[in-house]
Amino acid sequence: MVEEVHIRHTHLHGMKPKHIGHGPAVKSLLALQQIAPQLGRGQPVGKRLHHCGTFPDTMFTVTPVRALADNYIWVLQQNRRAIIVDPGQAAPAQAFLEANQLTLEAILLTHHHADHTGGISELSQRWPEAKVYGPADIALVQEAVMDGSHIDTTLGSIAVLAVPGHTLDHLAYRLDGHLFCGDTLFGAGCGKLFEGTAAQMYQSLNTLAQLPDNTLIYPAHEYTLSNLAFARR
Ligand SMILES: [Zn+2]
């Protein structure tokens, strides 16, 4: 499986300069092509991709936990410590933590929508020592972060980027070459403009496009097929 994905990546990378005009946008999506074939198989994505040799040298693994209709709760783990991103539901996240004997260290929130924050109360009750980081407008956030903030964790220092557009408070989190971008960037699409302007979203996507080419993108929803179907209309 790893080899198959690796070939696909090489193939796409080869296509980019010759056949696709939107360099930066495509570059951002390429990393997702690495992830998509593996989702839903219960495999820790980050670690498997790490074996390909062309990805950031990280010690932690990243696993998607499915929640609600099409949400991904991303779980980063190392040495039985876990950080979770956008727990829209507590139960699937808690089940994953228990099944893997993990201690929850922190919760990262990208924006205030309920399908990203709905599980916080329950998880905070179970893990009172796990700090909740996110935009200042979310009541359950314990430490507000913003563009340029850094969060020190046992997995490393996580950089915070402001990416307004989908909402005005939207943040993305970057640890090594892994980007957790919430509802800003998806496979073959971007998030709906609920609060921000198109200009803000464009600026935010450009911010993400400036990250290194081998950045792995972890969106908060699985929209890839529906985005591609929409693009073909
Ligand atoms: Zn949202």
Image: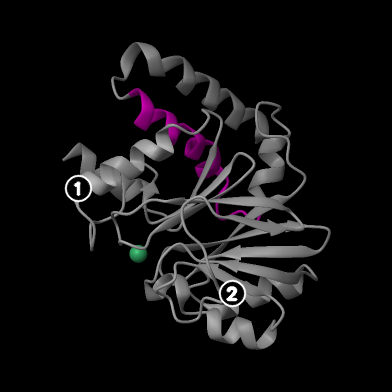
Q: Amino acid at mark 2?
A: Pro
Which callout, 1 or 2, points to the residue nearer the camera?
1
- Residue at 72% in and 59% down: 153
Left or right: 15 as drawn, with respect to 54: left
Which dot marks residue 217? none
Q: Position of residue 209 (x, y in %)?
A: 41, 34
Q: Main secondary structure of the magenta part?
A: helix
Residue 18's image quarter?
A: top left
Residue 96 drawn in magenta:
no
Left or right: 44 as drawn, with respect to 72: right
Q: Amino acid at mark 1?
A: Ala
Of all residues, the one furthest to the left in this rendering is 233
- Residue at 53% in and 26% down: 9
Residue 30 drawn in magenta:
yes
Of all residues, the one furthest to the right in this rendering is 79
Q: Position of residue 192 (x, y in %)?
A: 25, 56
The Cα atoms of the two marked residues, 1 and 2, are separated by 34 Å
Looking at the rendering, the stretch of residues picked out in magenta corresponds to 23-43
- Residue marked by disc 1: 198
Q: Position of residue 162 (x, y in %)?
A: 41, 52
Q: How many marks?
A: 2
In the structure shown, which secondary structural element does the residue marked by tag 2 occupy? helix
* Residue count near mark 2 (Cα–Cα under 10 Å), binned few <14, some 14–19, many ≥20: some
- Residue marked by disc 2: 92
- Residue at 26% in and 48% down: 200
Of all residues, the one furthest to the top in this rendering is 18
Residue 121's image quarter?
A: bottom right
